[in-house]
Image (cartoon, rainbow, N blue to C red):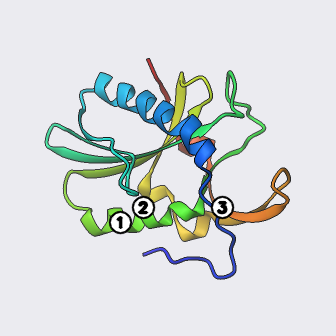
Amino acid sequence: MLQPIKGSYYRKFQPQSYKENDNKAKNAITSYLESNGHNILDTEEDFSFDIKSEKKGGKYFSEVEMKNQWKGDWNPKWKEIRIPYRKYRLINKYKNVEGDNTYCNFYVIRGDCKQAWRIKDFQLTKECAKEIWLTNARRYEHFFHIPYTEAELVEIK
């Protein structure tokens, strides 16, 4: 199980950002999942996974996040995809229900919702968690750093 990082900063909930992005992200990935044969079970806010679905007997837990800075093709200068470390709680929650035919995916979605990176739960490890300086926020924060070459780029219709 992943543990909190002592002394680390965790961004406070931002209601305006949530209002602008949550439904947009959920709708994009719900559409993607349905077009790939998923039956959507739940998208209600319960401070757990954003989307719960099933496909061919498998249970899927999906977490979505907008990356509004991403416009057009992925900028190859961005060598990695960063997922806030605070999501470790979801990874731990998933590990408690993990079993045969259960899957957990994190989606980082382009601002126009036409593409997303899919990252699988096992890729988010303590070893890939690093602290970075956020210039616009003028503080450090921990993120999982996943090389984009190790993620799957998916097209959203």
Expressed as whole percent of the image width and height from the top left, the position of residue 111 reads 62, 28
Q: Is residue 53 left or right of residue 83?
A: left
Select label 2 or label 3 by which is in front: 3
Separation of residues labelled 2 and 3 (CA atoms): 16 Å
Work out whether residue 125 or residue 19 is closer to the camera in this orientation and state it: 19
- Vertical side of 112 occupied by 67: above or below: below
Q: Residue at x 37, y 25 (%)?
A: 31
- Vertical side of 133 occupied by 36: above or below: above
Q: Residue at x 63, y 61 (%)?
A: 12
Q: Which residue is mark 3?
A: 11
Residue 28, quarter of the rendered image? top left
- Vertical side of 17 occupied by 121: above or below: below
Q: Are marks 1 and 2 in contact (CB under 8 Å)?
A: yes
Please name the amino acid that badge 3 sits on.
Answer: Arg
- Marking on residue 85: none
Q: Residue at x 25, y 64 (%)?
A: 97
Q: Which residue is mark 2?
A: 90
Select label 1 or label 3 by which is in front: 3
Q: Which residue is mark 1?
A: 93
Please name the amino acid that badge 2 sits on.
Answer: Leu
- Which circle's residue, 1 or 3, is located before the other in the chain? 3
Please name the amino acid that badge 1 sits on.
Answer: Lys
Separation of residues labelled 1 and 2 (CA atoms): 5 Å
| Badge 3 element | loop
